[in-house]
Image (tube, rainbow, N blue to C red):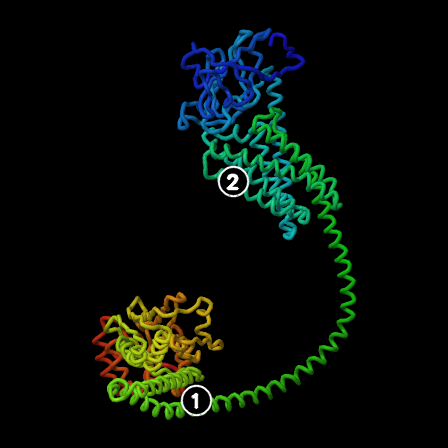
Amino acid sequence: MRDWDFEKSPVVSMDGEWEFFSNKFLSENPELERDGLIQVPGSWKNFRTEHVKQEERGIGTYRLKILTDENLNLYSLHVHGIGVAGRIYIDGVLIKSNGKVGKTYEEVLPSYRHPLLNINTQSNEMILTIEVSNFNHPFGGLRKTIQFGKSDALVRNLYFRVSEDLFLFGVTIIMGIYHIFLFTLRRSEYSFFWFGLICFFIGARALFTNTVFIYEYLDESNWFFIHKLDILSYSLLVPIIIKYFSDMYPEDVSRAFTDFVSYVFLVYSCLVIIFSSYVYMSLVKVTHVILVSYLISWIFFILKILKNKRENSYIMAFSTILFLVTGVNDILNQNLYLNNGYLLNYGLLGFLIAQIFLLSKRFVSTYNKIENLTYELVTKNKNLEELNEEKNKYLDRIKKWNEDLNLLVEQKTKEFKEEKDRAILSNEIKSKFLAIVSHDLRSPIVTVNSNLKLLLNKHVLYFNNESNAIIREAYNTLESSLVLINNLLNQNRVLLPYIDLDYELVELKSLIDESISMVALKAQEKNIEINNYSQPELVSILDKELMKMVLINILGNSIKFSENTPINIYLYSQPGRFKIKISDQGTGISEEHIPLLFLRDRKLTTMGTRGEKGNGLGLPFCKEIIELHRGEIHVKSVFGEGSEFTISLPSYDHITVSLCSNEDFSLSELKDCFPDSHIVQLKNPEFFFTLFTRIIPDKVILEPEYFKSNREKLLSLIQLNKDVRITKIYTLNKLKRELDQKEIF
């Protein structure tokens, strides 16, 4: 530097060849010989000699001898871009540690600080030595220019650059707050929101780059966290800018490519959060390639908006080109292809100013439209007032018509109520008639069917094969007719205005056995064995006849679609429920037919294995009966492999039992009194005491006279079970239509 004129150029860049000691710290052995010369600034990853190869992750020492015409105590050093920790020596004396150097990842504490160092020596020459450790970045070594010069000039340069960064930070943050505030006033204008976020991220970038203000201000121990925020301010900014352009020019942006770029950068952001700095900085080149491709696509975007003559397209084109050029410059600097400094922040500032102009113009245009619409609205409002008087006249007419209409509605409502009462009476008469006819028709069929069954079971030897076939055909025909009559009769009960279930205490295994016996002959004809794997001694409160018809229907279907395979029945208990599972290995049900099985308005009928026909009423009837018992039915089937029907019934651990007739106190009235209870109305008083020996109800509702005459008997039953649960007794008040609680203890 003896020939350098420091009066004209007080600061000089120490770019050039330095001595390099690969994989060594010179402070440990000052007598070591250099391994070669290395270019500064730059990464050490490409340094190789015949005997030495420098790894990306490792250590190394740089050395440079500086000679001047005057004492060096008036000079300073500004050290940039040590990757990623270093110790700085002058004439073998340590004057600054940037982070903490070490020989392993665990020993190193990275730092991105740019120290400004005064040179305290009276000599006109010195040896500058910098030891570097890198285990956190793909590019190690002295990656940026180190400046040497007059102390006052370096300080002025530093203050100027810090002022630039803080100015950019302040301006962009204020812009961001302003546009977010505009978005809160006009929620439909999402471009304000995205632009506000762009301003915030650009402001953040100003603190992470150039003078690295954040790294200088915060403690070095926070480097790992700060560096993630540094990279996130880049990786999240790109999708936000893409979203902004998509909202501004939705017809001109390529959705597929921009969405792809956005997803790539969002995924990369997640990787930054999860992995170490070496991993995500190794992948940053991939994002750079994609970003450059996206920036190149902007050229076509600019040409498109210019061709389509979009509003303010020339301003948008200029700001976009400025952003594109500075963005490419920063990518090249990041990868050490250039060393002219980061310019993207300035490009973004110009871009922001242009966008503010565009958004402001757009906002003013919208405001002018609102003013015009307001004027039109005021004009129309005046016309509306003129029409208001005429409207009031029509309203008076409408009011009179409405009064006449109300009178007509009252008259029609009265007529409808009378028709409804007649319809209910007709329905009850029809139901009684159907019940009588079905009963009278069923009785002789049952008798004939039983005789035919007896003939088939015991006297088959007295008839020839033709006679047996005729008898069996007659039996099957009568059996099908009997099932149809039973379905119609029971379905008639279900369709009554109120449901009158005939509850009784039922031992479930016995109920299943009875149902099996009803279909045993059909099963025998098709060589089908029905296995009852039921858990014994399980009891429930059911309408026995209706539930038996449910089981017969399901078993009949299993027999209908099976041949030479077993049918298995399982009964078991679960907390609060009983489960009955009927499985067969028959033809099964196709997947598209399963949702139609229980629909009343979609009668689904299929021929059996021997051409048996059905009427499509059975399974919808079964579902309705099970739901009346607060149960559920489910089916699983694989076509060609078989079916499995599962019936789930409540175990009635908590019920309210009523011995009041429906005429005295309807079921709906009882439910109004006890909305959270399951109410069972019993017709047979004697059955009530049988029930009490197996199931303890929470509440009992009785007629007053019955309560008086059976008080002692009730008391004894409750005392036997008082350790389990206290049962509350209620009597009905017919006049008040209320229930009174009775204390019997």
Residue 93 image point, x, y percent = 46, 13
Going from N to C along the chain, the mark reached first, 1 or 2, is 2
- In what quadrant of the picture does the N terminus appear? top right
Q: Tell me if residue 228 can be seen.
A: yes
- For badge 2, the amino acid type reads Ser
Instruction: Describe the element under mark 2 as helix, strand or loop.
Output: helix
Residue 191 image point, x, y percent = 65, 47
Q: Does residue 325 sit above or below 603 in this rendering?
A: above
Mark 1 vs mark 2: in front = 1
Describe residue 511's horizontal placement relative to residue 112 as left or right: left
Q: Tell me if residue 88 can be seen.
A: no
Bin the neighbour count of mark 1 within 10 Å (Cα to Cα): few under 14, some 14-19, many 20 and up. Answer: some
Label 1–label 2 contact, CB within 8 A: no
- Kindly report the distance in space between the C-alpha atoms of the residues bearing marks 1 and 2: 72 Å
Q: Does residue 98 sit above or below 296 in this rendering?
A: above
Bin the neighbour count of mark 2 within 10 Å (Cα to Cα): few under 14, some 14-19, many 20 and up. Answer: many
Residue 449 image point, x, y percent = 32, 88
Q: Does residue 99 sit above or below 261 in this rendering?
A: above
Question: Foreground residue, 444 or 429?
Answer: 444
- For badge 1, the amino acid type reads Ser
In percent of the image, x 47 and y 89: which residue is there? 427
Describe residue 488's horizontal placement relative to residue 331 as left or right: left
Question: Foreground residue, 446 or 394?
Answer: 446
- The residue identified by callout 2 is 269
Residue 86 image point, x, y percent = 47, 21
- The residue identified by callout 1 is 431
Question: Foreground residue, 510 or 612?
Answer: 612
Circle on res. 219: none
> How many discs appear?
2
In percent of the image, x 52 and y 88: which residue is there? 420
Instruction: Describe the element under mark 1 as helix, strand or loop.
Output: helix
